[in-house]
Amino acid sequence: MTESTTSKAARILIVEDEAAIRTLISFACAAAGYDVKCVEDAVQAQSVVDSDPPDLILLDYMLPELSGVDWLEQLHANPKTEHLPVIMLTARGSESDRVKGLNAGADDYIVKPFMPRELIARIQAVLRRYQHQNQAMEDNKNTVIVCGPLTMNEASFEAKVDGEPLSLSAKEFKLLLVFAKNPERVYSREMLLSLVWDNAYVDERTVDVHMLRLRKQLQGTRAENLLQTVRGLGYRAHISE
Ligand code: CA
């Protein structure tokens, strides 16, 4: 983080157990000007993330011991690492794996074999999105949104109900924020996908899964009925007095 302002290369962590693919990806990323680090499994990846968090992780789905998707869930369960951008790599292109990866919080998904330039384009897109988000967060510093008993701080990523913090993943936070900013407004799944996921590869079921998780988080709080299903249309936040 102390490099000169002229060329601060984004740091990419590659987590891939197959040496040939690791080398290929690493070459492609280095050629595109990224600062690359490679590891072979989730344990090594975790230690890199703990000591020197990268700007983006390229994560293979199938890894020995802990799978990529299981590790991603751990990353996103930890408030310190839940905002790290992740692109999943996999040889398995099945719909259910794709949904699993995205539900675990991956920002994008790329199926092997892929063209290096396609990979680089995806990396650029995800990094750009995060830069925009970070900029928006800077701009919104000290902005606290209040929606009934719920308060959300966009700068610190904190969400609380009656002062009690909720434990949300980055995607869950963004999703809840959409509702908190516009109570009573109905959002279709399609709208939520474009607002929160900004990604054509995500399935509408992903929205339902995240809504379910949000409701679980709100259970037992005064905001437990905040998120409502509007039949045939989508969801809204409703503040009951
Ligand atoms: Ca693998």
Image: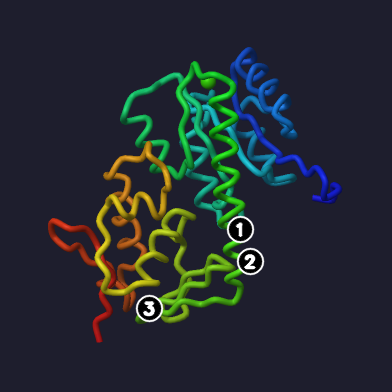
Where is mark 1, residue-wise?
134
Q: CA distance from mark 3 to mark 1?
A: 23 Å
- Check disc 1 and give the amino acid type: Asn
Are the residues flagged by discs 2 and 1 in contact, CB closer than 8 Å? yes
The percent coordinates of residue 148 (x first, y second) are 35, 81
Q: Which quadrant of the structure image shows residue 166?
A: bottom left
- Check disc 2 and give the amino acid type: Glu
Pointer 2 local density, CA inside 10 Å: few below 14, some 14–19, many at least 20 = few
Are the residues flagged by discs 3 and 2 in contact, CB closer than 8 Å? no
Where is mark 2, residue-wise?
138
Label 3 sits on a secondary structure element that is strand
3 or 1: tag closer to the N-terminus:
1
Q: CA distance from mark 2 to mark 1?
A: 6 Å
Residue shown at the point (37%, 50%) measured from the top left = 194
The percent coordinates of residue 134 (x first, y second) are 61, 58
| Comparing labels 3 and 2, the label whose residue is closer to the camera | 2
Residue that lies at the very extreme toward the top in this rendered image: 20
Pointer 3 local density, CA inside 10 Å: few below 14, some 14–19, many at least 20 = many
Residue that lies at the very extreme toward the bottom in this rendered image: 241
